[in-house]
Amino acid sequence: MTVADVFSVTYTKGIFEIAKSLGLDLHVGSDFDEFRAISKEHPLKPYVNPAFDPDFVDISPLTGLWLIGTNANGEIVHTQAIKLLELTNANLAEHFRSNLTDYRTHGYDFDVDRSCCFLSPAASRISGRVSYHGELWLKGGSDGYRGGCLATILTRLMKALCLQRWSPDFMIGLQSPVTSCRGLAAREGYVHLEQRSIVWQLRDCADAMEDWLVWMSREEAAFNLRVPPEFFYNLFEFDDYVKTSEVEQLRKTA
């Protein structure tokens, strides 16, 4: 089974239809000046992190994609973005050492010179065409969308679009320890999780923050993301779905 077979038009169309049934309209774009302008008007997330801000990094419609979800009132309730890194002449460890400032979180004053990156030998050797996935935000609260299937299927949609467009050798992302420990890596389909990958030292104090690296190869993505989006819709959106008979049926059909 090839990547093209797994991530067919039917796969992505199914995610759009599920999102629509849950009250979201999805919009895909590649102009990151537009993405930044849209974000600046957003009251809950009025910024773009440096890795996707065209004022900080070289990103174009040829190397980046973004996804925005809006509710029935036109309010932005979801964002995420992905871009292609050409690491043909460097590995991931070298890339992070040379470009660590690109991966800062907006709003924090980090002392990058005192911040450190720690990767496993396998992750250090990542090279070639590498996609970086970030800007993930989904509105929470009583009128929000967290806790259901959307965080799972929308991140997988972005990966499917990425694989269709670029077929990268590897896919990577950075997560906070809290989101990783709550299962986001598994929901997104990542195979590898490396704890304490980047330790960000805050300026003029002893405090530090962490990012944890998640990654997988193209072949691992094709294997793990072959699970249809309807599986996750059923798993998360129905309270009585944990009945043994239904779970057993899923195991037979997945």
Image: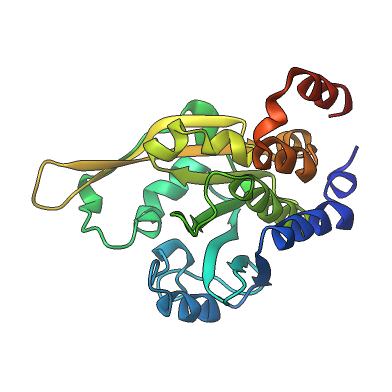
Looking at the picture, the colour scheme in use is rainbow
Whether residue 135 sits left or right of residue 105 in the image: it is: right
Residue at x 70%, y 53% (from the top left corner): 157
Residue at x 59%, y 33% (from the top left corner): 186
Using the image, determine if residue 237 lies above or below residue 17.
above
Whether residue 43 sits left or right of residue 150 in the image: it is: left
Specify the farthest residue to the left. Answer: 204
Q: Is residue 88 visible to us here?
A: no
Whether residue 113 sits left or right of residue 142 in the image: it is: left
Residue at x 50%, y 35% (from the top left corner): 124
Task: Kindly indicate the quadrant of the structure image that contains residue 107.
Answer: bottom left
Foreground residue among 225 and 241: 241
Q: Position of residue 172 (x, y in %)?
A: 56, 45
Using the image, determine if residue 15 lies above or below residue 242.
below
Q: Is residue 198 visible to us here?
A: yes
Task: Kindly indicate the quadrant of the structure image that contains residue 82.
Answer: bottom right
Specify the farthest residue to the front. Answer: 240
State which quarter of the image contains the C terminus: top right
State which quarter of the image contains the N terminus: top right
Q: Position of residue 71 (x, y in %)?
A: 59, 69
- How many numbered discs? 0
Using the image, determine if residue 98 lies above or below residue 175.
below
Whether residue 182 sits left or right of residue 2 in the image: it is: left
Q: Position of residue 211 (x, y in %)?
A: 38, 42
Residue at x 38%, y 47% (from the top left corner): 97
Q: Position of residue 19 (x, y in %)?
A: 70, 58
